[in-house]
Image (cartoon, helix red, strand yellow):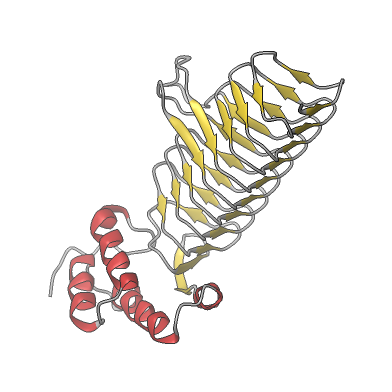
């Protein structure tokens, strides 16, 4: 049977695996599922629509499946779906979807630090780190193995690719392609996320080719159209090059830190 403090409130219709630990003053509503190995710390609130996977630790004051902060939401039933092996630190707020049957998703093995806010219908990938007080608006996507440093802000409907580092306090107002470092305000391209890529066992040749791709996109003062053409001509095919090309082609109308240049050479 789950180990539930007699000072916690757990609705009788909530489903908790047999080894879940619920500390004093935690609050768990009816339409909740919490899988094995989870620990719910004091004063955490797990609200209707929470679907929590295995081995998650949810710290003091966190609120999971808070009602959306969006005027379009009219009380529809929706979800927050959390994968396995995540740490969700103090006073984190994760909003559920504004759409009936929709969901806000947190993947696996991520670390969400204190006072971070994740808006409705957002998708956070696997092995993501969100620093203290990161603010993520609705309909945002954060790719696997990305890091957003403390106080970063991501605007609605922005997509941050995989293996990205966004430096502290940066305001993301466009799509951020994979493998990059972004910094400053207004947001600017700062380089390739080489240190983390090496930790992820990407070869020096691959990292060099990634840098060539972004030299064309960010440093040569040409249009996105021409940057794509040069990448395809100058950089040897690889999974990483193709991932960059696909991201740019899908998001070229609102790439972060790329000047708008209409002319084609």
Rendered location of residue 9, percent (x, y)? 77, 18
Q: Quadrant of the N terminus?
A: top right
Tell me what residue is drawn at x 41 percent, y 23 percent: 101
Q: How many numbered tags mark residues here?
A: 0
Question: In the rendered image of this protein, does residue 63 appear above or below residue 164?
Answer: above
Q: Residue at x 20, y 78 (%)?
A: 230
65 vs 244: above or below: above
Residue 48 picture location, percent across and down: 59, 20
* Residue 207, horizontal then vertical, whole percent: 42, 80
Residue 212, compared with residue 93, is above or below; it is below
Q: Considering only vertical position in the picture, is 224 above or below 135?
A: below
The percent position of residue 127, horizontal first and vertical second, equals 56, 57
Residue 100 lies left or right of residue 254; in this view the side is right
- Answer with the quarter of the image where residue 217 lies: bottom left
> Looking at the image, which is closer to me, 28 or 172?
28
**Residue farthest along the left direction in this orientation:** 265
Q: Quadrant of the C terminus?
A: bottom left
| Front-lying residue, 79 or 173 | 79
In-front residue for pair 258/90: 90
Tell me: 53 left or right of 191: right
């Amino acid at each position: 049977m789950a180990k539930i403090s007699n000072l916690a409130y757990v609705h009788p219709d909530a489903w908790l695996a047999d080894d879940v630990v619920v500390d004093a003053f935690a609050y768990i509503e009816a339409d909740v599922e919490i899988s094995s190995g989870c620990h719910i710390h004091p004063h955490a609130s797990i609200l209707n629509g929470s679907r929590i996977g295995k081995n998650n630790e949810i710290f003091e004051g966190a609120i999971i499946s808070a009602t959306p902060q969006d005027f379009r939401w009219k009380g529809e039933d929706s979800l927050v779906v959390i994968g396995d092996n995540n740490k969700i630190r103090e006073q984190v707020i994760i909003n559920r979807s504004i759409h009936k049957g929709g969901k806000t998703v947190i993947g696996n093995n991520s670390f969400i630090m204190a006072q971070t806010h994740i808006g409705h219908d957002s998708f956070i990938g696997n092995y993501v780190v969100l620093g203290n007080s990161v603010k993520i608006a609705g309909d945002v996507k954060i790719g696997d193995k990305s890091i957003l440093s403390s106080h970063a802000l991501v605007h609605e409907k922005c997509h941050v690719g995989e293996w990205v580092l966004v430096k502290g306090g940066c305001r993301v107002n466009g799509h951020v392609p994979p493998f990059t470092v972004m910094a400053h305000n207004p947001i600017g391209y700062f380089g390739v996320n080489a240190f983390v890529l090496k930790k992820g066992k990407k070869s020096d040749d691959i990292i060099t080719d990634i840098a060539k791709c972004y030299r064309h996109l960010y440093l040569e003062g040409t249009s996105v159209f021409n940057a794509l053409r040069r990448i395809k001509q100058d950089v040897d095919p690889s999974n990483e090059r193709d991932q960059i090309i696909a991201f740019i082609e899908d998001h070229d109308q609102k790439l972060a830190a790329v000047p708008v240049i209409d002319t084609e050479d």
